[in-house]
Amino acid sequence: MYYKNARIFTPDFQFHTGAFEVKDHRFGAVLPKYVPENAVDLGGATVIPGLIDVHNHGNSGADFSDGDYAGLKTMAAYLLENGITSFAPASMTLPYPVLEQAFATARRLKDEAPAGCARLMGIHMEGPYFSEAKKGAQNGEYLKNPDFPGFRQLYDGCGGLIRIVDVAPELPGAAEFIRQAQALCTVSVAHTDSDYDHARMAFASGATHLTHLYNAMPGIHHRKPGVIPAAVEAPHVRAELICDGLHVHPASVRLAFAMFGGARMILISDALRCCGMPDGEYELGGQTVQLSGGVARLADGTLAGSATNLYQCMVNAIVFGIDEADAVRAATYNPACALGVQDQVGTIATGKLADFIVCRGDYTGRRVFLGGEEI
């Protein structure tokens, strides 16, 4: 099947008008010289790769940490409907047995790949190796110092599906944990009160990721630079950004892209089970969250995760003034790289899985395709 007259986001991270082919659930020729007469005319529509959310806790009343397979399927179905064709569900700071159960459901979804669900491409292990001072909405009862043997047991137990693990670099044993874990997956600096030197140590030891930039970390101070300048100075480090319009001010969204550049930014949702749900009371890692007016907070007023999906976050970024190509890249190719699956998804390129979105130039009127089949 050929599609023509499309504005395509191609692997050079630019938009080009032309055609592309889908064959055997993968992309065939992209911008081919010859296009069959019976090609489907998309009427100038914009075509981008399916989005990839590397930090998503839940939606539709379900949370990954519940360890419930039916709930995880519900999450994956909602994501696919909203243009997120691949994802890495994020866990919370919880006891190892609870994480083990959740990770088992992820492995099952990965293996079974049920129809109507986004592709599960890994797990984001957010916690429990965090600072008490910057735990945010994480449950302080279950915080631990970095524990590589415990992490390795969880990693092996889910067949190596953990693709991102978070750690606060100022904790005892963090440097050695990072050196060992980076051989297995992406290591991210997160929920940290680290100073500049500890952060530099983490990035020198193999950490390549920064979880939800600005949130749950020290701000930028001209005499106490901290984590963020250390990450900016490390060219191998990518930074996540929650772009729901609540966690980060639009000016700070623009600052983030100016500091890191479009090649190093990753848009995320950090969505909770209240995403896609009405205002009310919800649970998060053993704590109560109140959703009111689209804002999710703990009882003490702490801002929790978001109630927004990644597609809306990408649109928000564009509205906030981020270059369209940079925003799309930050929701597709860059997150694929963080999960180590850029050879399968993340760009419209020959041989990759044909996961893509067809929409108007303003990103309305969305049609979602998984493996070349419209959902």
Image (cartoon, rainbow, N blue to C red):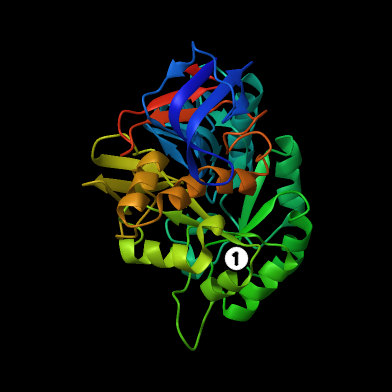
Instruction: Please say if 281 is above or below 298.
Output: above
Q: Residue at x 60, y 31 (%)?
A: 106
- How far across and how far down the image is residue 350, in percent? 65, 30
Q: Position of residue 295 (x, y in %)?
A: 27, 50
Describe residue 202's horizontal placement relative to residue 131 as left or right.
right
Residue furthest to the left in view is 293
> Camera-side residue: 267 or 36?
36
Dividing the picture into quarters, in which one does residue 157 lie?
A: top right
Q: Could you tell me residue 225's position as x and y percent?
A: 52, 81
Residue closest to the eye, 358 or 134: 358
The residue lying at 60 percent from left, 43 percent from top is: 336
Quadrant where the C terminus sits is top left
Q: Is residue 276 left or right of residue 209?
A: left
Residue tagged by mark 1?
A: 168
Nearer to the camera, 88 or 354: 354
The quadrant in which residue 108 appears is: top right
